[in-house]
Amino acid sequence: MENVADENWQVLLSLFPPGWDRLAFRHRAVARLRGFPSVEALLRTLMLHVGRGYSLRETATQAKLAGLAEVSDVTVFNRLRQAEDWLHRLCQELLQETGLVLPADPAGRNVRLLDGTLIKEPGRTGGLWRIHYSLQIPTLTCDHLELTSAAGAGNGETLKRFPARPGDLVLADRGFCRAAGIEALHRQGADVIVRLNTSNLPLDTLNRVPFPLLMRLRELSEAGQVGDWPVMIRGSTPPLEGRLCAVRKSQQAILKGQRRIQRKAQQGGPAPKPETLEYACYVVVFTTLWTVEFPAREVLEWYRLRWQIELVFKRLKTLAQMGHLPKYEPASARAWLYGKLLVALLTQKLIHLGRAVSPWGYPLRSVQQFQSLARF
């Protein structure tokens, strides 16, 4: 009789894209199944490492105990490195299934999503690391990955850490909204769309007087109304001009955002200022894109693209809190990141199916066969 672990694995396996095993050969994750009885056993072993947070040695031990394979930790490491393109492709397939809708063509720009997260390795001696990564949209190709200590000067989230080139369009959340980082990317020829952090990015009008942010936002009195104002980063050398693009939220979204702020105060945080609650009525982004090329609504649509996959990244950050990241080999580190993304996308799909599709919590394995039988 199938045990619970095997049953759970079969449910998880049903969520993978069709032909996932053939993709392993196509993307050269498997040339020979040396040490593994099947592609499925290889995938399950890799999921032990990236999904459960086991070290390479623990993964090899657990794979043996589960009857998956008798391999060494070195073999697991090599298989992970070889699986980079395979795991990347599986992530792309799952992202496409979500029906993610891209805005209009960004005028030939290379759209990149920059982010970072902390990794806490398990155990008393496990270290705390920060991973800084950049993913191209919509391919989810990791074009930059860097690992630093979580503590110490210069190891926080900053756009200054990321290399860029002319034609890049960088999407980032408010944690990256600092003048020095925006200026660093601009000097390299990149443009940015970043969620405004009113505490960290002082702005002036083009006449070099403080920009009246709340006054301008109050002009947006109806849900969906959009504002677009030229601004200048205060103290930038040479002067760096940009734009603020804002949209007023729906009343439901406003109340949700304000409740989130008040909940933090109830949990021991500082009491929110009145203007903080008022800022929660809007989504405001700073961008260096020109108005003629990118109207405000299009800028906001590109930022919404980041928001559409925000749940995936939140789950990625949760999953990355525990795990042994290969620290000294770029290919295996990227494969580890793709593995974490894959688990996050599978989690999202499982939640969606469990809530909205079937009362038993997973899709039937052969819907086409069922439909064929129903004709007779």
Image (tube, grey):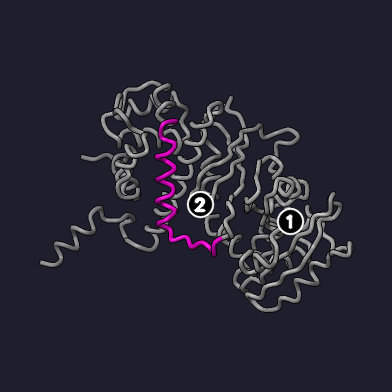
Q: Quadrant of residue 98?
A: bottom left
- Left or right of residue 66, residue 346 in this image: right
Q: Foreground residue, 189 or 25?
A: 189
Magenta span = 81-105
Residue 283 position (above or below residue 337) = below
> Residue at coordinates 51% horizontally, 61% vertically from top-left?
102
> Residue at coordinates 67% horizontally, 50% vertically from top-left?
190
Q: Are marks 1 and 2 in contact (CB under 8 Å)?
A: no
> Whole-percent x and y of residue 36?
29, 28
Q: Residues within 10 Å of mark 2 (few under 14, many from 20)?
A: many
The secondary element bearing badge 2 is classed as helix
The secondary element bearing badge 1 is classed as loop
Residue 70 position (above or below residue 19) = above
Q: Foreground residue, 359 or 137?
A: 137
Which label belongs to residue 312?
2
> Residue at coordinates 56% horizontally, 28% vertically from top-left?
327
Residue 93 on the magenta segment: yes
- Left or right of residue 53, residue 130 in this image: right
Residue 292 on the magenta segment: no
Query: On the image, numbered disc 1 is attached to which residue?
Result: 197
Amino acid identity at mark 2: Val
Residue 215 position (above or below residue 264) = below
Q: Quadrant of residue 278?
A: bottom right
Q: Residues within 10 Å of mark 1 (few under 14, many from 20)?
A: some
- Left or right of residue 265, residue 135 in this image: left
Q: Gap in Å between the C-alphas at discs 1 and 2?
A: 22 Å
> Whole-percent x and y of residue 231?
79, 63
Amino acid identity at mark 1: Asn
Magenta span: helix, strand or loop, mainly? helix
Q: Quadrant of residue 174?
A: bottom right
